[in-house]
Amino acid sequence: MNDVQSKESWEKIAMNGPLTHPVVIRGDQSGWDDVGHRVTGRKGKNFGFFDAVHGIGLRAAVNVTTSERSTPRHRHIFDQVRFILKGKVKYGREIYNEGDCIYLPEGVPYGPEDASVCEEKLGLTMQFPGPARFPKPHPEELKRAQKELAQIGRFDGGVFVWPDGRKQDGSEAVTEYLMGDNIKYPPPRYSDIVGMRSKNHPWQPLKGASGVSVKHLGYFNDVGPNIKLVKIEPGASTQPGSAPCQQVRYIIEGEAIYEDERYQAVSCMYYPAHAPYSATSSDNGTTLLVMQLASPELDPPPYCLI
Amino acid sequence: MIRELALEGEELTMNTQEQNQNASDLAMNGPITCPMVIREDDGVVRGAMHRGDGRRSKHFGFFDREHGIAWRVGMSVYTHERMNPRHKHCFDQIRYYVRGGEKYGRDIFGPGDCVYFPEGVPYGPQTTADGYDENVRIGMQFSGPAAIYYPHLKEIKKAQDELSQIGRFEKGLYVAPDGHKKDSFETIYERITGQEFKYPSPRYENYVAMHTANYTWEPLDGVRGVTVKHLGYFNEIGPNVKLVKIDAGAATPEGTAQCQQVRIVLEGDVTYQGETYNSISCMYFPARTPYLATSSRGGATLLVVQRAGPDGSRPPFCLI
């Protein structure tokens, strides 16, 4: 994994499979791009993780959003988790700041999103099938749909404008184009997005792992997401293991060591369900955002298996 | 179908209370060293409290200071007379709507909605929603993650009586003789503890409302005829909130949990230790205390709320 060739092949595996073992993708590599149908004010990198053969389809990304970005109030057929690393953002009347984690459940309208509250925001986004199990399209499919739709109408400030002037949420237009049908949103399980102020959650020692502590932010639905922050003190490490669920672990602060490789913030780890994973250690200390989701066979995450 | 709630006649209910003095006394004062089940008719009736008129409540329990238990579980009927200003608490709450509708700011919650109110998070103003004469809900209050002292109803009542001799309670506020207004619970809490009231830092941005009708029933591993809706698990100590459906003739297993549990019979009937209980009845299982199977002859739905035991042992994700 030290040479460029290996790094590129890991990135390809993360985006297309086969994902049969843990992968770790660095955030400082190539692949930062203007992403998505909202057109302006966002640049980001998709870490992964897609493998249709093994039933894996979730988008884990890091994004820089600038103040000109705005999106209309809308909703999705999938679940999302967002974490703000730097800056702030406004959804409707609420402003979310550094360290805030937001769960945006399927079918729940949110926004409008207003990025003008700060010049630049650095954030993490994860999108994945919610309890209704609508598959999350691959970013390449979304890009293709966006390109083809742009031949028909135009994207304008997060909205798609059809040739007859009809306006539709950009994400909805892209999704319907891919599905070839009207979207039927899943009935919302929650009345609103759930904002978790991680700074106000205390660190709790992790049983059996000296020097490792956890903030339990929230566990939603039978399939997750089960969202936690994990802090590894200098010289400490998490346990190796194997979990019945899928896991995405973002390195959000410091440096983590996995299988003798060093990874700086922001890097992203994916552990497939039931696949053995190694210990994660740190020489100087690190903080991880850990999100656990049911396996493709729908085995739920345990409450606290790190 | 949840039957009409019998909260109309305090006199009638007091007779029932007398017959079941022991169960109510134990639930409200301890010792609580074994599972207990309180029928709706056995609950302690209370009228309006410090928020003013427009509320009738029954309290199932559960208080036992010696064993570290302080968990207020009750059922209340609210009418339009009641209007609570926007406020927050130093404890956690769970509310489950049985009938009618209640409005919180712009949100309206009705039957089947379950709302988690985390400590330190402001909510409201709240009132019975337009189009409804009243709203009926199950309420639970307990120490949140900040572990701030949760007072007994008797302590609240005593402080309220004492404060009423000095100033007056008005629409959820306490008005001191000099005209100074303060949230009524803050005033009562300071009277009880003799300490300045401080709110814990909110862990969540807002309350979390769960539309339980939109969740799917998931089979409970290894238990035929029992299914679960996993609504949400918050903090490291809970609450872990679930609905459990027991089909006719089925039963939940006996067991022991490291956490405390309240199980409210929302619909149907359950049988526990040879006794049959209808909706609305309330079960309390202390932490680390063996409990028996709960069966149902005609089918039942339970609201199950689990919290860490007094020693801090947290609820497993799904132990029913």
Image: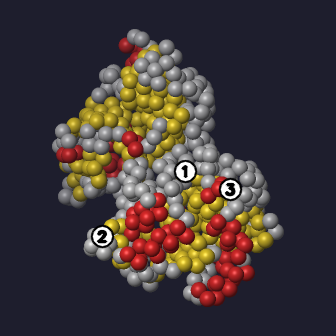
Q: Say above or below: A174 vs B149.
A: above
Which quadrant of the figure contains the C terminus of chain B?
bottom right
Outermost residue to the top: A3
Q: Earlier in the sequence, mark 1 or mark 3?
A: 1
Q: Quadrant of the N terminus of chain B?
A: bottom right
Q: Are marks 2 and 3 in contact (CB under 8 Å)?
A: no
Subunit of label 2: B
* Residue A125 in picture, x, y percent from top left: 37, 39
In front: label 2 or label 1: 2
Q: Which residue has dot 2 on it?
A: B181
Q: Which mark is residue A199?
A: none
What residue occupies the far right of the structure in this picture?
A: B274
What residue does disc 3 label? B286
Which residue is tagged 1? B238
State yes or no: discs 1 and 3 in contact (Cβ < 8 Å).
Answer: no
Query: Seen in the image, is B227 located left or right of residue A69?
Result: right
At label 3, which amino acid type do we have?
Pro
Q: Above or below — where is B248 with respect to B131?
A: above
On screen, A2 above or below B156?
Answer: above
Which amino acid does the dot numbered 2 rest on?
Lys
Based on the displayed image, in which of its 4 quarters is residue A265 positioned? top left
As rendered, which of A293 and B275 lies closer to the eye? B275
Do the residues indicated by labels 2 and 3 lie within the same chain of the protein? yes
Read off the chain for label 3. B
Residue B229, can we see it? no
Please say which color scheme the image uses.
secondary structure
